[in-house]
Image: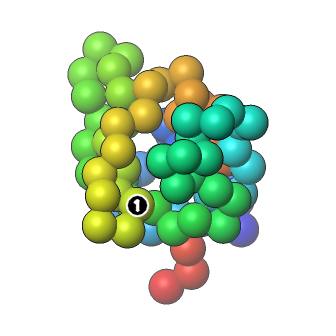
Amino acid sequence: MITSSLYSANGLSSYTLTAIPTHPLLSSLGLRQGSQVSIVSRQPLGGPIVIRLGQRCLAIARDIAEQIQIQETAR
């Protein structure tokens, strides 16, 4: 499977987080390696990407989302 950044995801699938930058805030939000996420929306003009993690929606800044590596979840 191909690995890419969270920000470059097309939003039509579910994804598994494969690599996450070390940051206490990301961990406290529940973003951990192996977590399953889906794309809710992408804000215009380089704004944040909104993801669904379980029952919650989280806005992740573009510069952070570009550092998070994902892999498309097999259907």
User: How many numbered callouts?
Assistant: 1
Please indicate whether residue 67 sits to the left or right of residue 42 in the image.
Answer: right
* Residue, far top: 45
15, 56: nearer the viewer: 56
Please indicate whether residue 41 sits to the left or right of residue 52 in the image.
Answer: left
Does residue 21 appear in the picture of this structure? Answer: yes
Q: Which residue corresponds to mark 1?
A: 53
Badge 1 amino acid: Leu
The residue that appears at 56% across and 35% down in the rendered structure is 25
53, 75: nearer the viewer: 53
63, 74: nearer the viewer: 63
* Residue, far bottom: 75
Query: Looking at the rendering, in which quadrant would you find the N terminus?
Result: bottom right
Q: Position of residue 32 (x, y in %)?
A: 64, 56
Q: Position of residue 51 (x, y in %)?
A: 36, 50
The residue that appears at 48% across and 47% down in the rendered structure is 29
Q: Secondary structure at mark 1?
A: strand
Please indicate whether residue 14 sits to the left or right of residue 4 in the image.
Answer: left
